[in-house]
Amino acid sequence: MSIESMPPQLGVVARRGESPQSFLLALNDALRPLAKAADILATASRLLGQYLGANRVAYFEMRGPDYIIERDFTDGVPSLEGRCPAVSFGQHMLALYRAGQTVVVNDVASHPLLSADERAVQAEASVAAYIGVPLIKNGEFVVGLGVHSQVPRDWTPEEVTLVEDTAERTWAAVERLRAEDALSRSEQHYRTLFDSIDQGLCIIEVLFDDEGRPNDYRFLQTNAAFERHTGLLNATGRRMREMAPDHEAFWYETYGHIALTGEAMRFEHAAEALERHFDVSAFRIGGPLDCKVAVLFSDITERKRHEQALRDADRRKDEFLAILAHELRNPLAPIVNSLHILRGGGGSMNVDRLHDILERQVSHLVRLVDDLMEVSRITTGKVELRREPVDLAEVMKSAIDTSRPLIDAAGHELSVALPAEPLRLHADAVRLTQVLANLLNNAAKYTPAGGRIWLSARREGAQAVVSVRDNGMGIHADMLDQVFELFAQADQGTHRAQGGLGIGLTLVRSLVHLHGGTVQACSDGPGRGSEFLVRLPLSPEPAGLTPS
């Protein structure tokens, strides 16, 4: 069966144009039910090729001096299935693969590391541009993932990273299946796997109560990786209830079912008593009277957290787009209304008043677009700091002047404690003013009317520390590390009425990092106020001027 003819139920991929995170989540879902290594490689190649719009995707294994391609995905180009000398595709490229380096070629015809013969080989194979990702096991190049284009193509860093992530995830799944197949075929060889595989592996004896219900199990054997994946020490010979009294009934019932029926199972499930999440393959050893089960598993707690973080990021993005639409619509309505009135002769409204409305709303639109452009410039590395000797006190005064109208409009009391000594920085004064003004504006927005805001600065060793503190609505503990993420304001629920796009703190963190500093959010919780601490490196003091 060719890869092109594989049934659609083998996996639904994220559409081109959707985020790489969505693709990786869809890839995980597509690979999870597959039970054959060949199907995993074929499905991953197909999904990656369709997502990237590539002409060919293939896994190539190193066997002696040759590449072996068992199956590949193709779109408009011939298949390369079979064996070919590795050096024919590039001696220098093979050396890079063996060094564990990803190879990115945008144009085969002009690449300096390819000889004329090597270019001819690739041209004959309809390869004009490609990404090659090697996988190194035990210090050796064993397999690679190639993504080919039949025309020159400028691969983006995001595409290269996606190919690397896909290669690692897919090959890990293949290795796991091969290990499982080896265990199922030959119980006599399991000891070698016990000592060599990275996954946790144990043989358990399921224990039953007087009514024949599984209620515990005993560890008969465990491998070296068992402790790392479970956190359980010296488990061999001990019962699970002895080691984790609160272990969930699910595990006893599942392993009991496998022991009695002989049905092999593959599943992912949380072990709350161990505070971990596991990917498990389990099958019976011997007959039903032996009650023995082999369990091959991996701790996937971090992967689950990462997947949840990706889902949260996608959700925040969607919420941000809804916020952006709302923020752009707000000024458009009065603009349209004013233009309609002007077109009708002005009606009873003063023309100057209509002009004021138009000017105010257009200015609001310009500020929104400027904020978005600023984030884009910073995240793409297009911002250059204009560094010069700067007195931190002067920056603080400029920030206060910028934020004063918003603070006064809300009736807040601002307390300022300028540094007791000159704190000199080598910095961009305009950008630092933007940082402190954003923090002051944030405090003003999220503090109820008539609140208090404190701005202060001090020296701590070789750093200047600026504090912006308020007695406002505070921040949930689980949001303290997220408030600087793009679009994080969408998580502030009922406080969305404060307006804005939720990118101010992202700008703050990016600009502070460009200055070689750090920024930290602190809060005792909702309703308890918040504090933001900005740490910046001080300029070296000239000889003889170091403060006592």
Image: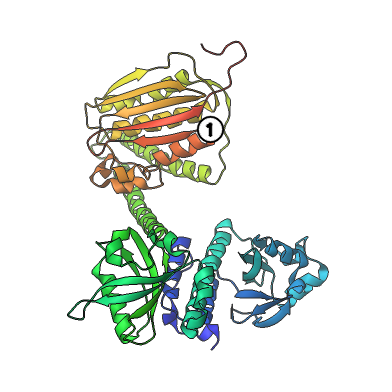
Tell me, yes or no, if residue 343 can be seen here.
Answer: no
Q: Residue at x 65, y 61 (%)?
A: 100
Q: Is residue 538 left or right of residue 398?
A: right
Residue 42 lies left or right of residue 101; in this view the side is left
Q: Is residue 93 visible?
A: yes
Nearer to me, 438 or 391: 391
Residue 60, placed above or below residue 375: below
Q: Residue at x 43, y 30 (%)?
A: 534
Residue drawn at the location 47% of the way across and 24% of the way down: 464
Q: How many marks?
A: 1
> Percent from the top left, x then y, of residue 484?
40, 42
Circle 1 — which element?
loop
Picture coordinates of residue 384, whole percent (x, y): 58, 36
As displayed, is residue 400 above or below residue 335? above
**Residue located at (43% from left, 20% from top):** 458
Residue 415 position, x and y percent, is 31, 19
Q: Which residue is mark 1?
A: 515
* Foreground residue among 58 and 153: 58
